[in-house]
Amino acid sequence: MKKFQTKKIAASIVIIAVAIISFAFINQERITVKGSDTMVILAQKWAEVYMKKNPNASIQVTGGGSGTGISALINGSTDICNASRKMKQTEIDKLKARYNTLGVEVPCAKDGITIYLHPTNKVKELTLKQLSDIFSGRIKNWKDVGGANAEIRLYGRENSSGTYVFFKDYVVKADYAPNCQTLPGTAAVVNAVKKDVNAIGYGGAAYSAGIEICKIKKDDKSPAYEANAETIKKNQYPITRYLYMYLRNRPTGAMKAYIDWILSPEGQSLVTEMGYFPVR
Amino acid sequence: MKKIYLVILVLSFITINVKAQSVEDSLRDQITEMKDRINGIDERLMTSESDLSKLTKIKLSGYIQTQFDNFENKAVQPNNYFSLRRVRLKATYEAADGIKFVVQPDFSPSGFSLKDAYVVLNDHFIKSGMFKNSLSLTAGKFNRLNYEVEYSSSQRELPERSTVIRALYPGERALGFKLEVNPQSIPIKLQLGMFNGNDGGFTQFSDTTGKSANNNIENKDFDNFKDIMARATYSLKLGDFGGLDFGAHAYFGSLKSSTNATLHSDYTTVDSSKVGDAVKRNWFGAEFQLFADVLGGMSLKGEYITGKNAMLGGSKFANGSLLPNFQNNFAGYYVYLIKNIGSKNQFAFRYDYYDPNTDITGSDVKVVKYNGDASKKIGKLTSSKADLAYTTLTFAWHYYFDDNIRISLAYAIVQNEKVAKNTAGVGNLTESYTNPDGTTGVNDYSDVFKQNQLTIRLQAKF
């Protein structure tokens, strides 16, 4: 209904455009990586090897859990977030509100969530339904799944863990039993199961050295599979997942070089070396 | 002699044996005591863990916005001051998986008001299919169903919401309930709400000079009519470029008439109505939000809303005539451009337009034809400042000191719709004011006069 002071507006827009372009090309030197405890040993290995090859690169890796990593990505305290689950819509909405992006998802490895048992446990395989019943507290005694007459002791991760969320969403499909003891890190779960004859725990395949692994069946009629490179590559192992790196924006400069290297044959060979499974 | 040695040996053996027995007993006692202690600690730890897990269900968050404003409109006195714009404390209690209680008061130096108080129940009944666990019910007092309304003031890139949103959703919140469907497999969100419909107050004529908002009856309904809102949004991913969210919302509301006529915003048409009839308030809006990963994050957001709003009549003129209700056709829109610059800085721009009366133009305001002659029989209403359109162009720069602190500088260029001039060359609508030194001045609406606003804000969030 009326005219604008177009000259003033045009001048303002030009000034702002120049400022935006100037700031946008500020280079980033140091890369911080935070998140999944499942991925922390892999992320540390990547950083260590990459920094040896590129002495100018500085990469700092910490764990804390996928949820913690995603929060750090949203609040700007990390450049890369490692997550063993996908970002939730509410988390993407927070990223949109603060940074006006949907984030960038980089699948960088595959993992099979492994069920740890004490070596003396008679139970050697379970169905997904039995796992759900065990971790939700519907089955409380090993005799109900073919084991000894003993109470099942549950060990799992804290709710900031991506493994906790993934296992809940895809296997338990209900609330965890109240007596499921939460521990900080997969290594702690493995240690607890090693010491407790009636224990069962879950975590990444890379932590399964020196502990009994339970084979998993999709249902009663399906064959049981152990998490290994072949069963995961063929999608036979029923609890297979991707491991992700999340970034706020499309990577450029040093960050792009690092991520390209992670996805290269050299970076992916470290995935195998560390007990995970490559994406390519 | 041999006998003596034998007796000593036997006695020594007995003594040693008794001592060993005693040590063993003592050790057993100590182990039992330690076990009891550990059990006791275990028990206390379990109690503490149980108490702690209850506490972790309570989440406290909030923010404080303290600011300095400078108004260029000389009619605003004082024209610069410090204020606490928002002081919010939000308490969320997750009673169980899928059940959430939220209470959020807003504090001000003179008291506090309840902004939000609602319970959210998430669906646990739909176990399979595309709507698995996708339903939620919210009941209480909460934000109405609109993008800018639901977008938190602590996140918003400009100090205040757009003019059209502030006019349609005063106070943002309403009492009622909403059903939300948010399927995990389809990026769609459907919302349906029912509200009292008068939250934030509604405008009622108070005298012969125009309109004024004088009726704020929050927390209690004014009539038996309930207002219905619906909103649907769809999120589209655009590959590496970003994403596009788009949607629409509709509002179907009514106010109870307390007079026998309704004047339309052309100031000519009068509908006769009975006391108790529904005076309709219906509008529709279309929205989009485009997020692009171009040299860092950038977004372009917009919304257009058009429809019919209403104000209640009822109070009497001095001559005893009843004032009519007033129904106005309106239109408004806003467009945001937001650009993140690095991780610490952000620039935002908004073009915002609101015309509360699309039936007449600015030059018609106060012109005889539009002075409500047709409504004389029920009381004469005249077109006024409230019928003028406004355009606001706002620029803002934010510096994120850290995750908790944001410093903002915003400048709003406000432009009024112009009215016609009379034969003396003066606008048909003027507004006089008194300067601090006692001199007087006039804002003449036949021109765009200075009414820009500068805001410097510090926001602390936790």
Image (cartoon, rainbow, N blue to C red):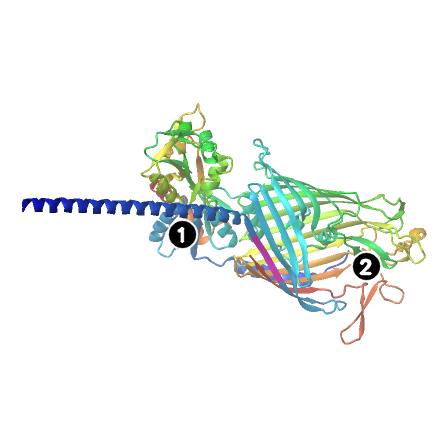
Check whether the beta carbons of the residues at disc 2 and disc 1 lie within 8 A of each other.
no
CA gap between label 2 and label 1 equals: 61 Å
Instruction: Determine the residue positioned at 47% across, 29% down.
Output: A129
Chain letter of the residue beneath label 2 in the structure image: B
Choose between B9 and A254: the one closer to the eye. Answer: B9
Look at the picture and state if B156 lies above or below A218: below
Write down the region rendered in magenta. B60-65
Nearer the observer: mark 2 or 1; the answer is 1
Choose between B258 and B254: the one closer to the eye. Answer: B258
Give the labeled residue for mark 1: A61
Choose between A73 and A278: the one closer to the eye. Answer: A73
Is residue A248 highlighted in magenta? no
Question: Image quadrant of residue A142?
Answer: top left
Residue A70 left/right relative to B429: left
Secondary structure beneath disc 2?
helix
Secondary structure beneath disc 1?
strand
Give the labeled residue for mark 2: B385
Category of crowding for the residue at label 2, using alpha-carbon neighbours closer than 10 angstroms: few (below 14), some (14–19), many (at least 20) = some
Residue at the extreme bottom of the image, as rendered: B437
Marks 2 and 1 on same chain? no
Amino acid under disc 2: Lys
Category of crowding for the residue at label 1, using alpha-carbon neighbours closer than 10 angstroms: few (below 14), some (14–19), many (at least 20) = many
Spot occupied by residue A117 in the image (x, y as percentages of width and height): 36, 35
Residue B284 left/right relative to A240: right
Spot occupied by residue A271 in the image (x, y as percentages of width and height): 37, 42
Where's the C terminus of chain A, which quadrant? top left
Chain letter of the residue beneath label 1 in the structure image: A
